[in-house]
Image (cartoon, rainbow, N blue to C red):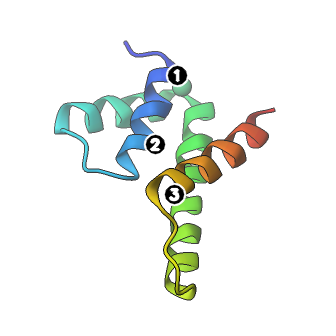
Amino acid sequence: MKKCREITELIERGSEERLPLRHRIEVKVHLMMCKLCRNFAKDTAFLDRLLKKINNFQQTQLTPSEKKQIKRKVNRSATD
Ligand SMILES: [Zn+2]
């Protein structure tokens, strides 16, 4: 059984790359039982869409590390 910390890391990774099936199942099962991580997954998906829109809108692309920083900041403020 994975901890929330590990699951949120997988969710973050999953927004950038395709996770192996095993991890995706672990995340899915965890999300069914854990409301906190469910909210985190929802926020991450929302931010992803938002960041994609910003990228489409702007001439300059955000770098992956800039995207990560934004996500970290927003997610941190959401859990405070
Ligand atoms: Zn959790």
- Label 1: which residue? 5
Of residue 29 and residue 43, the one placed in the foreground of this image is 43
Q: Nearer the viewer, residue 72 or 27?
A: 72
Near mark 1 (Cα within 10 A), the count class, few <14, some 14-19 or many ≥20, is few
* In-front residue for pair 23/64: 64
Number of marks present in the image shown? 3
Disc 2 crowd rating (10 Å Cα; few below 14, some 14-19, many 20+) is some
| Disc 2 residue lies near ligand 1 with CB under 8 A | no
Image point (56%, 34%), residue name: 37
Spot the residue most to the top: 1
Left or right: 31 in relation to 70 = left
Real-space CA distance between mark 3 and mark 1, rounded to the nearest whole angstrom: 17 Å
Q: Mark 2 or 1 closer to N-term? A: 1
In this rendering, is residue 33 above or below 78? above
Instruction: State ligand 1's quadrant.
Output: top right
Spatial distance from mark 2 to mark 1, Cα to Cα? 11 Å
Q: Could you tell whether 14 is left or right of 61 in the image?
A: left
Residue at (47, 61) in percent of width and height: 63
Residue matched to label 2: 12
Rendered location of residue 34, percent (x, y) = 55, 28
Question: Which mark is in front, 2 or 3?
Answer: 2
Residues under numbered marks 2 and 3 in contact, where contact means CB atoms less than 8 Å apart: no
Residue behind mark 3: 45
Secondary structure beneath dot 2 equals helix
How far apart are labels 2 and 3 at the CA level? 9 Å
**Residue drawn at 44 percent across, 22 percent down:** 6
